Image (tube, grey):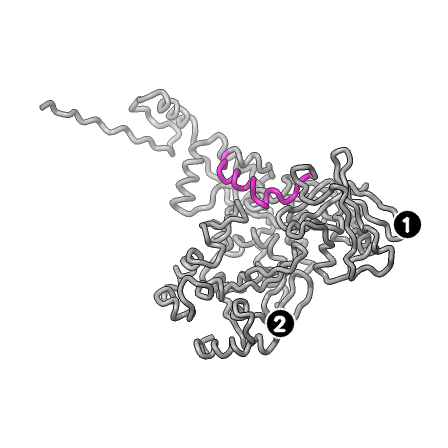
Amino acid sequence: MAKTKKKAPPTKLNPWHSSPTLLWTGGGFLTIFIILFSFTRYESYTSLYDAAYVGSEACGDCHTIVYREWQVSPHANMTRLASDDTVVGDFDDAQYILPEWAQQTEADKEPAAKMFTRNGNYYMALRHPNSGQYIPFEIEYVIGYQYRQEYLFREEGGVLRRLPLQWSVEQQAYFSYWNFQEGSMPSFEDFWAQMTSLNSAWNLFCARCHTTSLTIYDKNANHTYAVTDWVDDGIACEACHGPGSHHINYFKHNYINRIAAAINSRLRGQPVAYIATAPKMTAGQDLSVCARCHGADIYLGTTDVYRIYEPGYSREGRINDLSPYFKEAPLTPGRTTFTVEVYDDGRPKGIGMVFRSFVESESHIAAGVRCYDCHNPHQNKAATQPGLLAAGPESDNYCLACHTTISQNITGHTFHEANTPGSFCYDCHMPRNITNLATGVRHLTRTHTLGSIPSPHNSQLYGLEGSPNACQDCHADQPVAWSIEWYDRWWGDKD
């Protein structure tokens, strides 16, 4: 039998040396690869930096998979120029008439607004309260498309002004969003007044959360003049990861840097050079990425701090940690300020309080649960794992990974048959008690106070409107006293 000749092992190349010795030659590809390495050396980088914004397309050149995910996300498509592809409202000579309960005179029965297209452009014409004439406003941008759509026109002074009527996707009809939120009466006069408030100047107020890297070059005090710009329509890569020019330059022509970054990030848990990634940031900095737009429960004066926030590690000291403001406004029981309402029992109530409810939870404070544990940050309507955003076995598995004692006897904890409504973690500990009026119809969405314990006793004290409880969510046909009886029988004083 012929002996098999052993092959000499290939010489290991040290990628950290600028001139590795070529001791073994194989195919042409390997030769070229080694030659490239011969003229490349690893470059160190500083942990503090101030970069420039480059736009999402530059990110997509390398991050192709997550870029495609992001492109179809609500974040990416939040702010768009008005076109046949982006407008979801009815502009086929549509009309909006005040609801009957708001009609005070015969004139109120006339259309308050007419929506139409001319030469490919979209218009909303509002009836003037004095002259009765319909004044057309050409729509330049549309905001949103899932739940409702807002419409903006540009004034001569450069202000992008929001129009008072929005399209409800659920109702397939126009509605007066701000009147619905505030519980105020819509009228011809009020519609025009809505366009004179400071925060109706969209590119001076709202655009900070609906675009990427809003820059306000100039404005006047009453918000009738504005010179603004932004890098990306919608919430793009750099809105969460910070400006990317240094990151791109560092990796673009240096493959050694890429290899080193992969090793340092995946094996050593280090941040990637010149870019902010929430899981690699310190506590407070990580959730600031989300809080900047979703943490609405702050004082009016703090909005400027949130406006100039920038993810990253700024040498110049730009604000990258908003956590001192997460709980700035006290949870005053019975607060009625719209979108940040508080129940009479002191729990968050308004839709702007979802993030606030989360940072109040023990799961976040003690166990370190983060937004991106459940929510896919690049396709922001998707879960990080299938089923994680709904009550069911998949979300239970996430919770029970820590609450192992409960997992051993779920029925003994819930007193409901396993894998049925009432037995899932979300049913009792993330009940739907956050008020959402975004579509013109009242909905309830899940609180994020993970671990919220149903309290029918508080419902008896404050009433269900002032203190809803998860028991009544399922057993709405039963009185609160019935829930208290079963609560005491099952759990007694085990609050």
Sequence-wise first label, 1 or 2? 1
Considering depth in this image, is 41 or 126 the residue closer to the camera? 126
Q: Position of residue 429 (x, y in %)?
A: 49, 65
Mark 1 crowdedness (10 Å alpha carbons): few <14, some 14-19, many ≥20: few
Q: Position of residue 373 (x, y in %)?
A: 47, 53
Q: Which corner quadrant of the image does residue 6 belong to?
A: top left
Question: Quick one: SS at disc 1?
Answer: loop
- Left or right of 378? Residue 111 is right
In this rendering, the answer to whether 460 lies above or below 263 is: below
In the rendered image, which residue does mark 2 sit on?
466
Residue 233 visible in the current orientation: yes
Task: State the residue at coordinates (38%, 34%).
Answer: 16
Residue furthest toward the top? 28
Considering depth in this image, is 350 or 235 the residue closer to the camera? 350
Q: Which corner quadrant of the image does residue 33 belong to?
A: top left
- For marks 1 and 2, give the one nearer the viewer: 1
The range drawn in magenta is: 62-81
Task: State the residue at coordinates (78%, 59%).
Answer: 100
Residue type (three-letter) at the residue carrying disc 2: Gly
Mark 2 crowdedness (10 Å alpha carbons): few <14, some 14-19, many ≥20: many
In this rendering, the answer to whether 214 lies above or below 104 is: above
Where is the N terminus found, in terms of image quarters?
Answer: top left
In the rendered image, which residue does mark 1 sit on?
131
Q: Position of residue 199 (x, y in %)?
A: 74, 53
Q: Which corner quadrant of the image does residue 350 belong to?
A: bottom right
Residue 324 visible in the current orientation: no
- Left or right of 126? Residue 323 is left
